[in-house]
Image (spheres, rainbow, N blue to C red):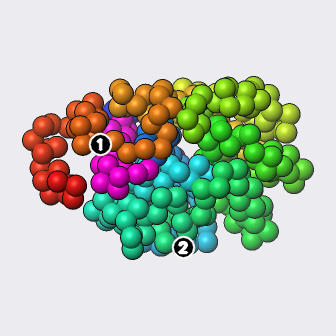
Amino acid sequence: MVSRPSIQELQEIARRARIETIKAIYLAGSGHPGGSLSIMDLLVALYFGGYVNVDPKNPYKPDRDRVILSKGHAAPAFYTILAFKGFFDKELLYTLRQLGSPLQGHVSRKHTPGVEASTGSLGQGLSIALGMALKARVDGLDYRTYALLSDGELQEGMTWEAAMTAKHFKAKRLIAVIDNNNIQLDDFVPKVNSGIYPIEDKFQACGWHTITIDGHDYNQILEAYDEALKVSEEKPVAIRAITVKGKGVKFMENTPAWHGKAPDREKFIEAMKDLGVSEKEIEEFLSKYDRKN
């Protein structure tokens, strides 16, 4: 295992990533802040904890690990992590959803280096990841494939077809990470469709090894990823990460209203303060970038 940053350093990376993600969504005037913030710690641990073999200078090398953002609406968080890893300049984040920008509202492989699959129509990511995992076997490569799912898309039949098929073909080095923030669209998941629970039992019935964690506790996240690396050599692994929608911004936390809308100027400033940004830094940013002035 490559030497990784300390938990405190990972937490600081996540704090800065949340700041840049909210900045991008604010400037765009649209986007999905809630699910971007809930998945951030899982992304930071994955990319900066030494688990993903990727090279920004050669983003499509054959033996790279594959990361499929099945919950494609969390694109702002994913773009921030890719920028922090060096796939493109951080300034590009401030062009999110703008005409001509490669950073579309949902991730696009055609436009953005580091993106493995164009997603946004929920429920397809696990099937894509399974195909990539099986292709590694055919090609004689040993890369890993990660699928980052939302809990809402566990209502999609295609997800369970993939889960069953993974067992049938004895897929290995396939790891699903479920961002279980318990909110989808404009309500809580159980009110939309309570049938997704119990998540662990369903994956186990499909032959998967399951792990359940607090998706904001880095000790638990890192231990889960370590366990998944070992177990996935024999069978696919599903990590259910219990998270908080809008994590890090108090007025967004566990609030369905912040699934898919951008903060106005007042709420943006409040969010920045929640994330530890000084008034001077906020004003400097707004003076330089805020075209709504």
Identify the image quadrant of residue 248. top left
Q: Is residue 266 left or right of residue 43?
A: left
Task: Tell me where residue 239 appears, x and y as whole percent.
Answer: 65, 36
Whether residue 96 can be seen here: yes
Q: Which residues are magenta?
A: 9-31
* Residue 14 on the magenta span: yes
Residue 264: numbered disc = 1
Q: Residue at x 17, y 54 (%)?
A: 293
Q: Which mark is residue 110?
A: 2
The residue located at (68%, 31%) in the rendering is: 192
From the viewer's perspective, is residue 40 above or below residue 104?
above
Q: Residue at x 74, y 40 (%)?
A: 155
Name above or below for residue 86 compared with residue 278: below
Q: Secondary structure at mark 2?
A: loop
Q: Residue furthest left?
A: 280
Residue farthest right in this picture: 168
How far across and down, in percent of the image, does residue 241 sit? 59, 32
Q: Is residue 277 magenta?
A: no
Q: 97 or 146, which is in the foreground?
A: 97
Q: Nearer the viewer, mark 1 or mark 2?
A: 1
> In the image, what residue occupies the spot 48% across and 54% down?
75
Q: Secondary structure at mark 1?
A: loop
Labels 1 and 2: the sequence-earlier one = 2
Question: In the rendered picture of this protein, how many numbered marks are placed on residues?
Answer: 2
Name the amino acid, label 2.
Lys
Calculate the distance from the C-alpha at mark 1 to the C-alpha at mark 2: 31 Å
Label 1: few (<14), some or many (≥20) within 10 Å?
Answer: few
The main secondary structure of the magenta stretch is helix
Above or below, 85 against 214 in this view is below
In the image, 31: left or right of 287? right
